[in-house]
Amino acid sequence: MTKYKLTDFDYHLPTERIAQFPSKKRIDSKLMILDRANNKINIDKFFNIINYIDESDLLVLNETKVIPARLEGYKPTGGKIEILLLEQVDKCIWKCLIKPGRRLKIGSTFIFNKGTLIGKIIEFKEHGERIVEFSFEGDFFDILYKIGKVPLPPYIKRDDTRLDKTRYQTVFAKEDGSVAAPTAGLHFSNNLLKNIKKKGIEIVTVNLKIGLDTFRPVYTPRIEDHKMHKEYCEIPTNTAGKINLSKEQSKKIVAVGTTTVRTLESFFQNGKLNSGKKWTDIFIYPSYKFKVVDKLLTNFHLPRSTLLMLVSAFAGYNFIMSAYQKAIEENFRFYSYGDAMLIL
């Protein structure tokens, strides 16, 4: 078994290849198709993805919904503060990142929207995270959707716009809770999904609430020493039943996004996929043996990221790294608002 080092997952990406805005239409993104059986790479447009999914395939989507998790406010002294909500701990309590936050202490307070929302640090956590208790009148999420901003990732070097409220969200998003989008799903339009169903392809859903830890770089020189943080995920009974039936009938499971992969693989036990709810810290890297997923739709990921390691485990390290180099040469757009890759 080959042992991979962290530096094996480095690659040079010209800055101009990082997508700063979404494509004009969701379905207009480029699509790179990796054929593992024949070790071939083809290039197409995303609106033709229906040509690469068979009628007997089962398409699995992550229906999580991105919340406007970025809050801009002030300290009582007048200094500006920005909070990024990471995870809801209780009704009024969230794990957060605060900027600037180095000099803050337990008990420090912040004011948002002229006092509509007030936050207070009640605990320090590792990696610079803070536990913040909020006080407000009414419903927290109602307030959040009025005053919060879209939590665009840091490699998008601009403030959010009205466009991001719709485009940094999948058309099938339902369940509040994520602070980052399941980016592979951003390419689908409602009309394309209708056409996929018309072809006879069945669609089911899972839910993994995406936190920033999914996208954080790995720092341990040996990748197997990296520890994933836990993320909450669910698989409905209906989804598990249809996937198990498909596997029994030798039909293919097409996962849309790495978060869908992690959810499905986390719930597989004793030869079948279970339904239910759990917190998962599954870390998938080369040498992992996939139990559920047969095909994977994904975006192009950051160097040294757990997501790049996951797709390398699925398609093969050498195949993925050569595909990334070809994507750079072919002017593909990378990361959240970038182009897509379908691994067959």
Image: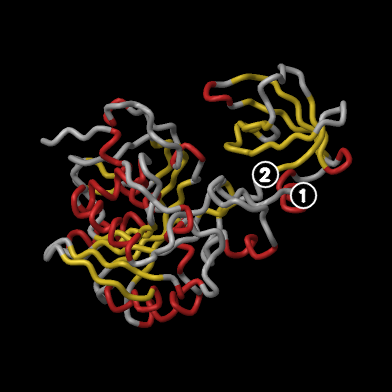
Numbered label attached to residue 337: none
Task: Name the colouring of the figure.
Answer: secondary structure
Q: Which quarter of the rendered picture does the C terminus lie within?
A: bottom left
In this view of the protein, which residue sits in the foreground, 323 or 26? 323
Taking 177 as reference, is 86 above or below it?
A: above
Marker disc for residue 70: 2
Q: Is residue 71 left or right of residue 292?
A: right
Q: Secondary structure at mark 1?
A: helix
Residue nearer the viewer, 264 or 43:
43
Residue 73 image-quadrant placement: top right
Q: Residue at x 26, y 55 (%)?
A: 293
Return the x and y of residue 298 as percentages of the image width and height: 36, 58
Density class for disc 2 (Cα within 10 Å; few <14, some 14-19, many ≥20) is: many
SS class of the residue under badge 2?
strand
Type of residue at label 1? Ile
> Mark 1 or mark 2, which is nearer the start of the sequence?
2
**Residue 147, disc:** 1
Position of residue 13 measured from the top left corner of the image (x, y, whole percent):
39, 51
Residue 212 lies, in percent from the top left, at 51, 40
Residue 203 to residue 17: above or below: below
Horizontal side, residue 16 vs residue 110: left or right: left
Q: Who's the residue at 17% across and 60% down the image?
A: 248
Nearest the viewer among 116 and 161 is 161
The type of residue carrying mark 2 is Arg
| Residue 154 position (above or below residue 52) | above
Residue 92 percent location from the top left of the image: 70, 34
Q: Quadrant of residue 299?
A: bottom left
Look at the image and tell me in which quarter the N terminus lies: top left
Q: Identify the residue shown where x is 71% and y is 47%.
A: 141
Labels in figure, total: 2
Q: CA distance from mark 2 to mark 1?
A: 9 Å
